[in-house]
Image (cartoon, helix red, strand yellow):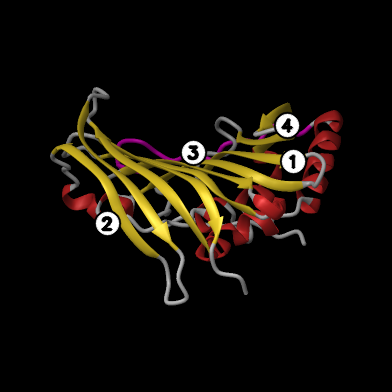
């Protein structure tokens, strides 16, 4: 059954900084031509028919499976040099009391420095439990599908790609320069399996502004079919950059890969 789409954890309020020296001027939105409007409306109709059941339930189904999980978190400085990392290989066994995780390999280096912005960083830095990215990439009411914002985004079909051995079409939504100023969702990509019309991967970029910082984040989630056609998490990526006038900027990235899924609990 089709769904609508999810939200991220951040601050989100858009503002005009230093009003005394730089005024905030309203921008004129260029009218959408008839050809662009037809293409846009067609793609919006397609988005409304995509099935999101598999990706929305992938992490809840994972509880019935034993699997291996590779997890790596890295921090980079403003010049994009690595300053710290942690790496884990986790063996997860499904039980009726809940998943039991055993870290079978671990490595680390450097020292993470989050400072005031620690609360914005992925929990994976110190927690080996899976983090479901669905609430961050699939909003119930995405801002780019709000009727008043449709002219502020472009909607394009980007061709096909292979997700494992399955053909998937790519649909991209991108904020227009100037017209979409103040809207935090900047780019979205849907990866939709052609045969089943199922959403199998999702990519999202967003920018959130606070009074004294700017947060730029990207999210990616990819599911894969296992035995019996069940779709489970395969890869998730989260990256965030915090920019502030008083401290050096830092970028944090967390990547997780799930493999060797074995159905352990049969309901």
On the image, numbered disc 2 is attached to which residue? 119
Question: What label does residue 193 carry, if any?
Answer: 1
- Per the image, the residue denoted by label 3 is 25
* Figure check: 265 above or below 216: below
In whole angstroms, how far apart are the C-alphas of marks 3 and 4? Answer: 29 Å
- Principal secondary structure, stretch drawn in magenta: loop
Distance of label 1 from label 4 (alpha carbons):
17 Å
Residue 16 visible from this viewpoint: no
For label 3, count other residues whose C-alpha is less than 10 Å away and answer few (under 14), some (14-19) or many (20+): few
Question: Is residue 153 in the magenta section?
Answer: no
Q: Is residue 25 magenta?
A: yes
- In this view of the protein, can residue 193 be seen by the observer? yes
Q: Secondary structure under badge 1?
A: strand
Front position among marks 1 and 3? 1
Nearest the viewer among 90 and 145 is 90
Mark 1 or mark 2: name the one nearer the start of the chain: 2
In the rendered view, would you say 157 is above or below 136? above
Residue at numbered disc 4: 156
142 vs 40: above or below: below
Which is nearer the eye, 6 or 146? 6
Question: Which badge, 3 or 4, is on the more N-terminal residue?
Answer: 3
For marks 4 and 2 on the same chain, the one whose residue lies earlier in the sequence = 2
Return the disc, 1 or 4, that comes first in the chain's sequence: 4
Pointers 3 and 4 in contact (CB under 8 A)?
no
Residue 199 lies, in percent from the top left, at 69, 47
């Amino acid at each position: 059954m089709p769904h609508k789409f999810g939200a991220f954890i951040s601050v989100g309020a858009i503002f005009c900084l230093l009003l005394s020296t730089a005024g905030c001027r309203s921008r004129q939105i260029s009218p959408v031509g008839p050809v662009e409007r037809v293409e846009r409306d067609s793609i919006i109709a397609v988005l409304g028919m995509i099935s999101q059941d598999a990706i929305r339930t992938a992490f809840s189904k994972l509880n019935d499976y034993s699997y291996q999980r590779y997890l790596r978190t890295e921090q980079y400085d403003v010049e994009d040099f690595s300053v710290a990392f942690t790496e884990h290989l986790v063996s997860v066994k499904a039980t009726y009391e809940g998943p039991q995780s055993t870290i079978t390999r671990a490595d680390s280096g450097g020292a993470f420095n989050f400072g005031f912005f620690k609360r914005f960083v992925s929990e994976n830095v110190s927690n080996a439990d899976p983090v479901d990215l669905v609430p961050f990439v699939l909003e119930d009411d995405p801002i780019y599908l709000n009727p008043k914002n449709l002219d502020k985004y472009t909607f394009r079909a980007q061709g096909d790609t292979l997700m494992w051995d399955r053909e998937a079409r790519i649909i991209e939504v991108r904020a227009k320069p100037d017209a979409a100023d103040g809207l935090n969702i900047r780019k979205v990509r849907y990866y939709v399996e052609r045969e089943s019309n199922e959403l199998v991967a999702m990519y999202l970029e967003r920018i959130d502004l606070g009074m004294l910082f700017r947060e730029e984040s990207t999210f990616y989630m990819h599911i894969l079919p296992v035995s019996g056609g069940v779709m489970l998490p395969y890869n998730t990526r989260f990256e965030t950059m915090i920019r502030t006038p008083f401290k050096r900027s830092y970028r944090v990235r967390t990547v997780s890969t799930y493999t060797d899924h074995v159905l352990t609990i049969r309901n």
